[in-house]
């Protein structure tokens, strides 16, 4: 394939998903020209319908006041249920296994309260050495909260020094070494830093062999890579809805608990009134009687305006064939990779796996000869990507609204700047 703007434009013309781009607001520069947006992995773009969805709830608040809880077109007391079907589809889960609530890190704590039950024989948590800082803080604080010491109870899976990704073998080895004294294994579905997509199905099996709980953080996986949480027998999962899912800055997070725990009401949990049996919630009873499934972990009534924005985004995902989305993601990311390897004059190290099955729509780049100035000049050229310390530039060609032409222009700009 010839590397040219015509090739890129032809690929865009043949792209069955090309029309979705116009459903989002694109950030523009001071002259009104669209920027090249490659941070959909950090904050997805704003759907044009988001305003309408939020205004609708504002209107009902204005006209109905508290009656909106029962009289709004989707009554607010059940508003959070309205995103279940869309989320379940994206996660490969049952509706009764997923919920939108709180934020990712809060949900992680709630889940660890139930699924990290350490004792002297099994007190460890295994995480990635390069785990997202919030996850690490949460894990360390949970360990301490149970009277254990992260020095002995927090186990890291580290990559080899010369290799940015982590081999399946290394994961197995670590689990084999520590599994019998481990209570919980917590993995990112897709590494925020390297973009590696882990074989969560396989790790789930290994975790079970050693009698460990297995939880996943899907912040960078949901809306990005194919997931089958139910069939993969994942114990719990948490995610945020503002990255690939375009749900809006700081919108509600997501949480999954496997169906097998649906009626295990004796699992320790932190409870709130929105997890109490829906039919009896307003009887103001003293004793907590949890809803079945994930709903029993819900604490509070939903932040309606945030869920409204999320609904706008999920309505778009509902229309998209997820197989086609993945296919475009694979091709577009490959196109970016080809441009960087074959048509870019700079020396670039790509930290993300080369195998499409082991990554989503993100390439993490390291420019050994250049520092942060490189990133700064990209910004000056209206390229929105992000910098992660110490030296990683993450570029996410999110397939819902990125064109092949954008990728071509990105490589062109890299060649231009010095
Ligand atoms: C983005 C991200 C978070 C964000 O946590 P919040 O609680 O939503 O602020 C957590 N973990 C990972 C892996 C992430 O990528």
Image (cartoon, rainbow, N blue to C red):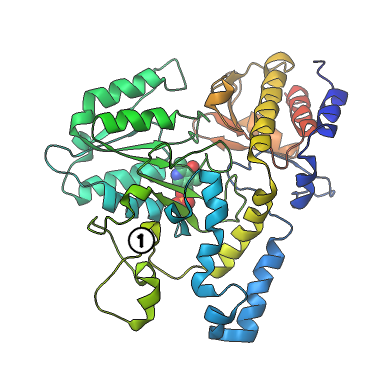
Q: Residues within 10 Å of mark 1 (few under 14, many from 20)?
A: some
- Up-down: is 161 above or below 257? above
Name the residue tied to disc 1: 292
Residue 313 pos. (x, y %)? 65, 54
Residue 136 pos. (x, y %)? 35, 41
Residue 186 pos. (x, y %)? 35, 38
- Nearer the observer, 7 or 201: 201
- Up-down: is 144 above or below 336? below
- Quadrant of the image occupied by residue 338: top right
Horizontal relation, residue 292 to residue 226: left or right: left
State the residue at coordinates (22%, 58%): 266
- Quadrant of the image occupied by residue 212: top left
- Up-down: is 62 above or below 15? below
Horizontal relation, residue 29 to residue 219: left or right: right
Residue 400 pos. (x, y %)? 70, 42
- Residue 397 visible, this orientation: no
- Up-down: is 367 above or below 212? above
* Number of dots carrying numbers: 1
Horizontal relation, residue 126 to residue 274: left or right: left
Q: Secondary structure at mark 1?
A: loop
- Nearer the observer, 228 or 149: 228
Horizontal relation, residue 199 to residue 24: left or right: left
- Residue 55 visible, this orientation: yes
- Nearer the observer, 235 or 415: 235
Give the position of the C terminus as an image quadrant: top right
């Amino acid at each position: 394939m010839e590397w040219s703007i015509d090739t890129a434009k032809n690929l865009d013309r043949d792209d069955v998903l090309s029309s979705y781009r116009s459903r989002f607001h694109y950030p523009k520069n001071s002259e009104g020209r669209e920027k090249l947006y490659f941070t959909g992995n950090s904050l997805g773009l704003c759907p044009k319908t988001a305003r309408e969805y939020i205004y609708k709830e504002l209107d009902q608040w204005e006209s109905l006041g508290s009656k909106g809880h029962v009289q709004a077109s989707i009554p607010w007391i059940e508003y959070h249920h309205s995103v279940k079907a869309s989320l379940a589809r994206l996660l490969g889960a049952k509706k009764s296994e997923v919920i939108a609530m709180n934020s990712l890190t809060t949900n992680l704590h709630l889940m660890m309260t139930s699924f990290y039950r350490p004792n002297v024989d099994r007190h460890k948590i295994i995480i990635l050495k390069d785990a997202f800082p919030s996850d690490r803080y949460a894990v360390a604080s949970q360990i301490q909260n149970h009277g254990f010491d992260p020095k002995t109870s927090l186990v890291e899976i580290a990559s080899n020094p010369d290799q940015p990704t982590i081999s399946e073998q290394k994961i197995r080895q670590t689990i084999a070494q520590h599994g019998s004294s481990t209570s919980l294994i917590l993995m990112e579905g897709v590494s925020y830093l390297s973009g590696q997509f882990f074989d969560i199905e396989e790790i789930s099996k290994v975790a079970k062999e050693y009698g460990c709980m297995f939880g996943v953080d899907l912040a960078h996986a949901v809306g990005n890579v194919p997931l089958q949480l139910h069939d993969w027998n994942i114990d719990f999962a948490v995610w945020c809805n503002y990255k690939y899912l375009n749900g809006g800055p700081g919108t509600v997070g997501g949480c999954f608990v496997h169906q097998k725990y649906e009626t295990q009401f004796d699992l320790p949990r932190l409870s709130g009134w929105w997890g109490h049996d829906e039919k009896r919630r307003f009887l103001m009873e003293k004793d907590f009687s949890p809803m079945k499934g994930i709903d029993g972990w819900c604490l509070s009534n939903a932040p309606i305006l945030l869920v409204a924005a999320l609904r706008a985004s999920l309505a778009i995902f509902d229309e998209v064939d997820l197989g086609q989305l993945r296919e475009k993601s694979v091709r577009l990311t490959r196109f970016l990779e080809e441009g960087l390897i074959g048509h870019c004059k700079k020396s670039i190290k790509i930290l993300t796996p080369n195998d499409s099955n082991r990554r989503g729509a993100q390439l993490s780049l390291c420019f050994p000869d250049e520092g942060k100035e490189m990133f700064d000049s990209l910004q000056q050229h209206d390229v929105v990507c992000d910098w992660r310390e110490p030296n990683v530039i993450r570029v996410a060609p999110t397939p819902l609204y990125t064109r092949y032409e954008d990728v071509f222009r990105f490589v062109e700009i890299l060649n231009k700047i010095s």
